[in-house]
Amino acid sequence: MRIGEKGERGAPGFDDPLGLLAACHGRIEGHCATLARLKVHVRAHGGDREAQVAAERVFGYFAQAGRWHHEDEERDLAPLLERHGDRALVAVMARLMAEHRDLERAYAPLERILRALPATPADLPIEPYVSLMRAHMQVEDTVVLPRARALLDSSEIAALGQAMAARRGVTLRAP
């Protein structure tokens, strides 16, 4: 059984930043599933080459794309949504932004072990990180993104996409 995962093709681009955020959730879920398989694999085989490759893939994703994703939400999406005055949504966003710190704290011990492979850990502490992440994404997918689609106009969507692209060093052509 391979513990790695294949990347998603045909993901939305910066012209659909809300779709891009949702697609990112799909990739994060894939990495959470990889962590679950990796935990079982490490128990049986230790930090072998397959475990190292999977750990590098997960660590690489969360070290870069995962950070960008949180920045997209905190620096760009949350302020755009706040301008619309939906107090309930603003409260949800505030809670989710605070959860980003909880997620970072939950990920820290896991990150140390992922980076240390092939040193064989006694256990791969994927919890509470995986459960917290899945619950967090559920709220974003069922509350935040649908509400954002309803509230944001085309200029706000374009600005969000531009900001997300710039964060990644991507220059977009003018429409």
Image (cartoon, rainbow, N blue to C red):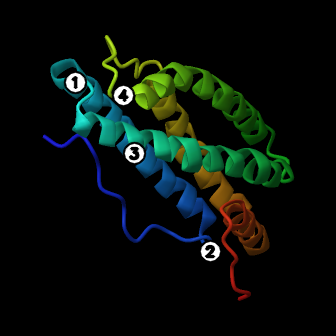
Counting from the top left corner in percent of width and height, residue 71 is at 70, 47
What residue is shown at x 79% (from left), y 45% (from top)?
A: 86
Residue linked to disc 2: 15
| Residue found at x 46% / y 33% | 134
- The outermost residue toward the top is 122
Label 3 close to label 4 by CB (< 8 Å) = no
**Mark 4: few/some/many CA within 10 Å (<14, 14-19, 20+):** some
The disc, 2 or 1, on the residue closer to the chain's N-terminal end is 2
Residue at 71% in and 68% down:
157
Marks 1 and 4, Cα distance to the nearest angstrom?
15 Å
- Residue 4 at least partly seen: yes
Q: Nearer the viewer, residue 16 or 172?
A: 172
The percent position of residue 112, horizontal first and vertical second, equals 49, 24
Camera-side mark, 1 or 4: 4
* Mark 2 crowd level (few <14, some 14–19, many ≥20, 10 Å Cα): some
Q: Callout 4, which amino acid?
A: Leu
Q: Which mark is residue 40?
A: 1
Q: Earlier in the sequence, mark 1 or mark 4?
A: 1
Tell which circle, 3 or 2, labels the residue nearer the N-terminal end.
Answer: 2
- Numbered tag placed on residue 117 in the rendering: 4
Q: Nearer the viewer, mark 3 or mark 2?
A: 3
Q: Which mark is residue 133?
A: none
